[in-house]
Amino acid sequence: MSGTSIVLGIFLMYWFLVSILDRRGILEKYNISTFGPLPILMIRTTKGLKLLDILARPKRYWRIFANIGILMMFAGMAAMFLVIVISDLALYTSFLNDSVPEPGKYNSPRNIFLIPGVNEFIPFTWGVIALIVTLVVHEFSHAILCRVENIRVKSMGILFALVPIGGFAEPDDEQLFGKKEEVKNELPLTATIEEIEAWEEREREEKKLKEIQKGEAASPAREETGNKPEVTATRTQRARILAAGVMANFCVAFIALLLFFGPVLGAIAPLSDAMIVGINESSPAQTAGLQEDMVITQVDDTNITTGMDFLSYLETVEPGDTLRIHASKDDTVSVYELKVPSSSEECLNGVPVGGIVEGSPAEEAGIETGMTMIRIDDTQMRSIASFVDFMEGTEPNQTIEVELLPSTNYTGDLTENGTAVFNVHLAPHPTGGDIGFLGVSYGGEGVLECPALGMSIWMPQAKFYLEALKQIPSLLSEPVGWIILFGLPIYGFAGEGFRGFSGTIAQFYHPVGWAEPLGVGIFWIANSLLWIGWLNFYVGLFNCLPAVPLDGGHVFRDYTYSLMYKFTKNESVSERLSNSITASFSMLILLSFLFMIFGPFVGQLI
């Protein structure tokens, strides 16, 4: 049985248990309720409410904070609505052009929701931590602003679903949104005499009760007992309370990402760029005890920072030598003694041609993918290191002679030795500089083969990747910088998605400076900050949408009412108009999301 099946079974048992306890009233007895039809428990308590009053004391500063939040909410509202409109137009255009994208992970329904364990881009552990922080910050900001505006908070508590998944604060909805209109039950025309008498009796009792309550409200004794008249938040107060959650999310996102891209990334450095990704059976590497996913950091007394360093060192090794290879795995560096075979076989018998750049000198000369370079001019190509060293000494417009082992399907002319020889006129390098450009890519996907030692080395460009991460803040002056930043966990730099320093990628880095005593703890801090920042931003932005029941929907409705009232001067008309406009936006946004989710599937059918 798989781990997923076990987790699903436990969750279903938990759901069943919650349903039974809810039906029997046991949950209600302990002031616990379920969150809608889902097995999410809302565990309430009144403890800690005094802390809210303490935190709410600097009312002036909280109101300034919330007023800025209102502006941020409207900016986020416009940005999110614009993104939705552009996405819908792009998908609609693809229908017209018969180029609807195929369903994939980027438009999968499971990835629309930012739920760890459901969304495949969000790692479970760091996602749960970030989600808890996000919800607690959002809800408690609402609660603090409620107390600032003298709105009662009935309870606080945690959301629980097998594990705690967030927190909540429960304000008095009638004070925050106003009392709901009572629905008057009319007596049916076919009522009997007994039903009419019973209805009249209820009317008399309700009338007496209202008179008693009215008298108590006017009594001085009410003030002595500490009871205060019911208050209802004004539209400005309600906007502050609702915008506080969004503003808090944005602030936490800013602080978390500032720490991540500042002192935390500054305390992480590349360990090495030479990871073992393949070990041949019964090879010298396997005999020495080397394993896949190990990172080579040193050979004898030479430090290794890239796979090219490793191959360059091997060119100095003679058959029969013994190498002391320092390799790291799971943050532990061990030394392995590897004996080089005494045969004359070299670590790399030439440089395999993994690809040809279109329009390059190599293509014009006739060099093909699958060939193996063994000589350029008088220099033997023992390894990729030999090729790189040679090319760094060339110049544009220089003519070189390249000798290659042909591929199996090569039909061109061959020498007596069975090799193909080409005279190639080098072009200027596309990146500039004074070196020549041949136009071949060596190896495959950054993997370097070393047959004599029986292992494959992968070069993931760890140093480049880290430097690219550090450069993101400097790009934020342009829209592309923001796209890279907030698409980083999903798309990364080239579609691979950056989900933090965990798993394989963490093998290539180590803590330095102030973080060195923390060990792997620096990666935990980095991952937590990355996902706390990312989730807080997106949850805050999502709540800006002008759709009820989101915070942005309530604020949008209130401000729409104020705008309508300036023209109509009629409260009931303004109320109806604002409700209709907000409902229309809510429906439009819902349909837009459904279109983005199911559009690609429909496109494939038609």
Image (cartoon, rainbow, N blue to C red):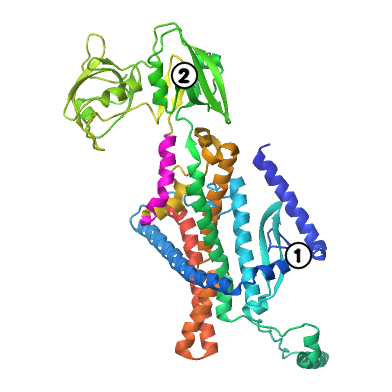
**Whether residue 463 can be seen here:** yes
Q: Quadrant of residue 134?
A: bottom right
Which residue carries the number 1 mark?
A: 45
Disc with the residue nearer the chain's start (1 vs 2): 1
Residue drawn at (70%, 66%) of the image: 51
Residues under labels 1 and 2: Cα distance?
63 Å
- Please tell me whether residue 365 is drawn above or below residue 166 in the rendered image: above
Q: Vertical placement of 322 versus 445: above or below? A: above
Residue 291, given in percent of the width and then of the height, sits at 55, 22
The residue sitting at 54% across, 89% down in the picture is 571
Residue drawn at the location 54% of the way across and 17% of the way down: 336
Q: Residue furthest front?
A: 514
Q: Is the residue marked by circle 1 packed among few (<14), some (14-19), or many (20+) residues within 10 Å?
A: some
Query: Where residue 444 sits in the image (x, y, percent)?
Result: 38, 28
Question: Magenta region, mostly helix, strand or loop?
Answer: helix
Which stretch appears magenta?
461-479
- State yes or no: residue 462 in magenta: yes
Circle 1: residue type: Thr
Is residue 208 shown in magenta? no
Residue 195, above or below 469: below
As shown in the figure, which amino acid type bears the numbered disc 2? Asp
Quadrant where the C terminus is found in the figure: bottom left
